[in-house]
Amino acid sequence: MRELPLPFACGGRRLSGTLALPDGPGPHPAVLLLPGSGPVDRDSDHRRMPLGVTRLLAHALAGAGLASLRYDKRGVGAGPGDWRRAGLYDNVDDAQAALAALAARGEADAGRLLLLGHSEGAVLATALAGRGADVAGLGLLCGAARPGEEVLRWQARRIAPTLPAPVRAVLRLLRTDLEARVAANHARVRATTGDTARIGGVRLNARWVREYLAYGPAADLARVRVPVLAVTGEKDLQVDPDDLAVIAGLVRGPVETRRLPDVTHTLRARSGPPSLRAYRREARLPLDPRVTALVTGWAVRTAGGGAGS
């Protein structure tokens, strides 16, 4: 495979991406890769936690004969601006511009484009598909089917028992219910009007949080008529694996869902109990081979695996 820089514009901003190409002259079926939330770059790397999800998927897809585009978010890597000032729908706009840039490349077959998102990237892919994006398929890795507010409250319930014992003891001592505290913070964020806000001493991307709390993917999922792959790990602490059944019930096209035992939100396997603290260790591992096999197999079946196929 080879990789080329692919800059593109959105709303007066110049964003930077990487076009990964398989061997052969093309045009190739191609995938737009969308990473998770927060200040992560085109490879899904945070400065304190290099997850590499989109980079590893790009390389796996190239090995299967598909091109891909991944790009830096606003205010991250080579992306201009401040990521805390970008709303959820700004991110959807950027994804739409990236898809157009990919479709315009001669190496990519504009009739065989796929969207593939992880975590928030799955939300962006869903919203973009709901806008009527001209794609042949939609891949949702750790994708939610419920409104953001419900997702975040579910996270609080799921994460609370996995916290270290001293932290749980302090919460009990202070009579603090983690889910109730999260709900209270949501109310404080909703009362804000600016792009950013300081909640509990932390500067937040308030506009993104407000928009995410209110966004419900069900309506957009119900507009999808192309093939969908939805994969979530059984040990995901951030997205309810039960949402797979909801996705299958909403999408009007062919749906393939997979609930993977022992796989966490990082798309790696973990033998012990899931824990946010384990993410750093998991990040040093390759993606679970079941994930890459599912993604590449589905992509080849849906869009083909090479020029003219």
Image (cartoon, grey):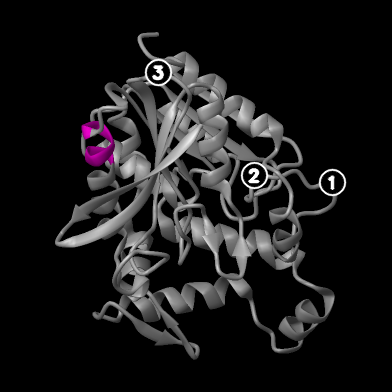
Residue extending furthest toward the top: 309
Indicate the position of residue 68 as horizontal and vertical percent values: 41, 35
Query: Considering only vertical position in the picture, is 279 above or below 218?
Result: below
Looking at the rendered structure, the secondary structure element under dot 1 is: loop
Question: Which class describes the residues within 10 Å of circle 2: few (<14), some (14-19), or many (20+)?
Answer: many
Which of the labelled discs sits on residue 303, or is there none?
Answer: 3
Q: Amino acid at mark 2?
A: Leu
Query: Considering only vertical position in the picture, is 29 above or below 174?
Result: above
Q: Amino acid at mark 3?
A: Ala
3 or 2: tag closer to the N-terminus? 2
For residue 101: magenta? yes
Which of the labelled discs sits on residue 177, or is there none?
Answer: none
Looking at the rendered structure, the secondary structure element under dot 3 is: helix
Is 275 left or right of 45, judged from the image as shown?
right
Quarter of the figure that contains the C terminus: top left
Which of the labelled discs sits on residue 271, or is there none?
Answer: 1
**What segment is highlighted magenta in the picture?**
99-104
